[in-house]
Image (tube, rainbow, N blue to C red):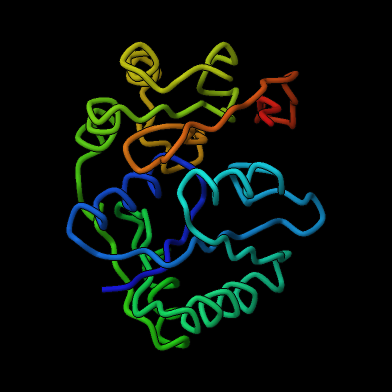
Amino acid sequence: MKFAMSYSCGKDSTLALHKMLEQGHEPVCLVVMVKEDAGRSYFHGADSTMLERYGEALALPVITCPAEGATYQTAFETGLLKAKTIGAEAVCFGDIDIEQNRKWEEERCKAAGLIPCFPLWQQSREKIVYELIRLGYKCLIKSVNRTVLPMELLGTFLDETAILTMKSAGIDICGENGEYHTLAVDGPVFREPLVFQIGDNIEMGDYAAADIR
């Protein structure tokens, strides 16, 4: 089956892409939501140059969908329709178990006439993070909620030490509640690793992010 990957550039959507390839499905593009006023991908903060590099590293065209809150739904559906014109029959998502998110995504797929796929659905948090490490994925910790995680994690890789820190903090180790976000930069689905620089940390209220370019 040909599919579009709803891609955040983070660990879960990267593992979901891995699973779809493992099952023999064929990706046709990445669909990435971009925060219009910032020029970066939603939640994970990849800028336009980095999104180009993702397309090169994953050997897939990138359909960017610029949006603000009020236009998010329309922009996403427009992106799905573009994916459909290049052969997508389905859309893959990296969601784990938040029913509200899944319902919204299923509705957008229905509107576009595409099949929704959730290869990580209802898998355990530990299975997901340790599978990423076992498979050799390199995921940089891009942002953290400073009220629950130390800023020292910023710009480091998601590894067993980082997971132990998260367990000690009592958070969801997949960060499903926004405790942290990652950027995947290398691993089995990448034809080449992303070359990156880590700049200063940016503090935004309860949150802090590493300027990764």
Residue occupying image coordinates x 36% and y 36%: 174
Residue occupying image coordinates x 36% and y 55%: 95
Viewer-side residue, 159 vs 21 = 21
Viewer-side residue, 89 vs 56 = 56
Viewer-side residue, 142 vs 23 = 23
Q: Position of residue 64 (x, y in %)?
A: 64, 63
Q: Position of residue 199 (x, y in %)?
A: 73, 20
- Would residue 117 appear left or right of 22 to someone viewing this image? right
Residue occupying image coordinates x 52% and y 35%: 183
Residue occupying image coordinates x 59% and y 42%: 44
In the rendered image of this protein, does residue 86 appear above or below residue 159? Answer: below
Residue 12 appears in which quarter of the rendering? Answer: top left
Q: Position of residue 197 (x, y in %)?
A: 67, 22
In the rendered image of this protein, does residue 84 appear above or below residue 53? Answer: below
- Would residue 159 appear left or right of 83 to someone viewing this image? left
In the rendered image of this protein, does residue 123 appear above or below residue 35? Answer: above
Q: Position of residue 185 (x, y in %)?
A: 49, 33
Image quarter of the C terminus: top right
In the rendered image of this protein, does residue 125 appear above or below residue 136? Answer: below
Could you tell me how many numbered marks the image carries?
A: 0
Residue 170 appears in which quarter of the rendering? Answer: top left
Image quarter of the N terminus: bottom left
